[in-house]
Image (tube, rainbow, N blue to C red):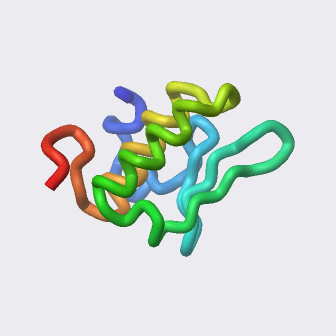
Amino acid sequence: MGLIKALPKKERKMKFNGVWITRNCLVLEHGPGTYEVELDRINTPRKACSWLVHLLEKEWVTTGQLLAMVHQLEDHFGYSLHGPLV
């Protein structure tokens, strides 16, 4: 968490903990490949939380990846996942 928050906003869009955002997807590294979620499926706090819960059920996803996902989505969409989901 500290590493991602300490970096300038522009640099946070880069790959951290195996997570990054492309033009239309959030991408998580998964073994030799990737797991991609289309941005329009996570463009609101409620949708993003639903995906976070879905990913928590996966044995391969790490806490670091989920945290990086939260920060990347907050920066990209300008919403907060650290408070009430309105």
Work out which quarter of the rendered image holds the N terminus and state it: top left
Tell me where residue 12 appears, x and y as whole percent.
Answer: 43, 49
Kindly identify the residue that appears in the image at 42 percent across and 61 percent down: 42
Tell me where residue 82 appears, x and y as whole percent.
Answer: 22, 38
Tell me where residue 68 appears, x and y as whole percent.
Answer: 47, 39
Check the image and report above or below for 38 versus 29: below
Quadrant in the rendering for residue 62: top right
Check the image and report above or below for 63 versus 51: above
Kindly identify the residue that appears in the image at 45 percent across and 38 percent down: 53
Check the image and report above or below for 66 versus 78: above
In the rendered view, does 17 fall on the left or right side of 6?
right
Check the image and report above or below for 65 versus 43: above
Kindly identify the residue that appears in the image at 74 percent across and 40 percent down: 30
Nearest the eye: 35 or 58 = 58
In this rendering, the count of numbered labels is: 0
Tell me where residue 71 appears, x and y as whole percent.
Answer: 37, 44
In the rendered view, does 53 fall on the left or right side of 80?
right
In the rendered view, does 77 fall on the left or right side of 20?
left
Work out which quarter of the rendered image holds the C terminus and state it: bottom left
Residue furthest right as drawn: 32
Nearest the eye: 31 or 12 = 31
